Image: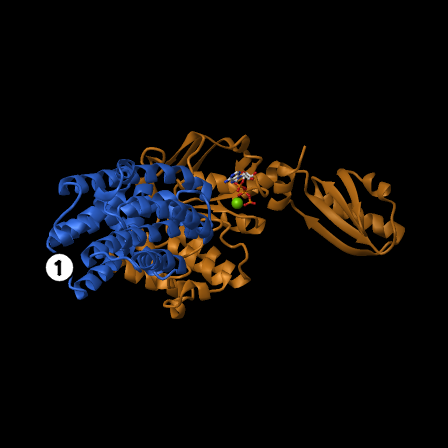
Chain colours: A blue, B orange
Amino acid sequence: MIDQMRRAYAIAKKDVRIYYLKGAVVIFGILSPAFLFLAFMIGRDLPVDFLIAGLLGMTIFFASTSVAPVIAPTETQTRNLERLAAAPISITTILFGDVLASVFFGIVISLVPIILGMALGVTVTHPFILALGIVLAAFCFSAMGLIFSSAPTSMTSTVMMLSTMIKFPLVFISGIFIPVQELPSWGQALASISPLTYITDLCRYSFQGACHYPVMVDIGALTVFLAVFMAIAIKLHERSLPKRL
Amino acid sequence: MKNVIEVKELTKHYNGLTAVDHINFEVEEGEVFGFLGPNGAGKTTTVRMLTGVIKPSSGNVCVMGFDLGRDPIRAKEMMGVVPELSNAYTELSAWNNLQFMAELYGVPKRVAVSRAEELLTRFDLYDRKDHKVKTFSKGMKQKLITAMSLMNDPDILFLDEPTSGLDVRSARLIKEMVRELRDACKTIFLTTHYMDEASQLCNRVAIINHGRIAAIDAPEKLKMRIGGLQYVEVSFAAHVDVSDLSAMTGIAGVRASGDKIQLYTDEPDRTIRGLVDYSQSFGLEIVTLNTLTPTLEDVFVKLTEEV
Ligand SMILES: Nc1ncnc2c1ncn2[C@@H]1O[C@H](COP(=O)(O)OP(=O)(O)OP(=O)(O)O)[C@@H](O)[C@H]1O
Ligand SMILES: [Mg+2]
């Protein structure tokens, strides 16, 4: 067990070295939340701490879901997978390594909006909750990224297209641009099925002290999403790995 | 002798196509076991099942006493694998690729450093160790991949066409390494299309065709088994009547191809004397005269030809 954890860490280290600077990761992970955010912010008069909380949630979301989906198709194409499959590690170990690399990327990138917010005078009222939320959300979204990459293809662009088709709608239903409590009841119902809603809510709590759901509900929901996403990702990858060789 | 690989009724179906069909064999400790067969015979599929990369449709594999279905991690820790189509991480340096392997196999850091240095020197790659693998030639990559498979000091090494596309010197380097490992009592499972390579290196070979094993034996014994294939090849300065030659005693068959005539026989000595007498009595000049014993290639062709 400890051996497998160490080996997962080795995989994460390899992922960091190879995939952080890939074009797709930079575009989908860093640039797209920035542009999406600017497009919505311009011409609207909203409080800064509300905006920063939304930006932070979105950044964690995009950054964490951008690394994992690149890895599996790229390694299919470059024919590295057979080596990994022959190594004394389980598929769960491989996936866990990929998640770690993705989480680390998400956390580091999320520092950008936090620093930006502090420069604009936003104060972090609950730093521990915020830190916990960011880590939990980064794990949750990384696992979600793995689900996208389980399609047995060697084309990174196919996986990216697939994930974009799911990611963008999620951004709109998650109370980032409009607070959840101001949504109609069908909108609130829709928001409650998106994990992004809960991390955004936690960010609001950390910055503004107020939130729509109780803090424990936010944390609980993210944990449940993480467990479910990870279980689905492992199942799907177990099925698709032999098809990639 | 202990069996380090035991394969029972191993089968793999790919949507309706049976790639490997109920094969059984054992590989003993310290043996170089050759696995030969025409393209698409099921060699790579078998190697993948033996190394735990794909799951068999049925049957089972034990490696070093560990059932690959139940205890894959323990079994895989003792293997080194050079897959048929594989690559090192091209974005990483040779050194980092080797260290990554060591980490995956749980090799302690200090051992890994000295072993990597040793292997890189052995494979003539030491001065390129910090270069990214994408700058390597095909042969250099193949040598690096072989070095990677040795990072965990495996007891069993699986090599799927390790010398295909290598120049003579690099191929020799790999063959030498196989011999050294054999002397160190390691077991090697070798897939190759080069018959002379199999003939030189292997203690035993299996010939697989259409997913079934056609024969398993020591190379020399396989050659004996298809006896009668020994022949004398002769060519004369002038045209001769083939039927004259087939009338000679002890000739099993005659085939003319080009200016050469092949006489199949169990007694090459007698045939040669007969040919000399024949040429003297008709005043014919012999241009070439060779005795040929069957090669592993003849065995291979005979056992895998379509019937
Ligand atoms: N992933 C796969 N999906 C479907 N069929 C496959 C797959 N892999 C192999 N096959 C089929 O299984 C059969 C055996 O293939 P295999 O790769 O084991 O042959 P081989 O003996 O290694 O051939 P070669 O000498 O060309 O490497 C072939 O008919 C091949 O088409
Ligand atoms: Mg093959």
What residue did someone put label 1 on?
A: A123
Q: x and y percent of residue B47 in the render?
A: 46, 42
For residue B8, which quarter of the picture?
top left
Who's the residue at 51% across and 58% down the image?
A: B171
In the rendered image, the quadrant that contains the N terminus of chain A is: top left
Q: Amino acid at mark 1?
A: Thr
Ligand 1 occupies quarter = top right
Secondary structure under the numbered disc 1 in the rendered image? loop
For residue A43, which quarter of the picture?
bottom left
Q: Is residue A94 visible?
A: no
Q: Nearer the viewer, residue B263 or B126?
A: B126
Q: x and y percent of residue A143 in the render?
A: 30, 44
Who's the residue at 25% across and 50% down the image?
A: A138
**Residue count near mark 1 (Cα–Cα under 10 Å), binned few <14, some 14–19, many ≥20:** some
> B232 left or right of B155?
right
Who's the residue at 51% across and 41% down the image?
A: B43
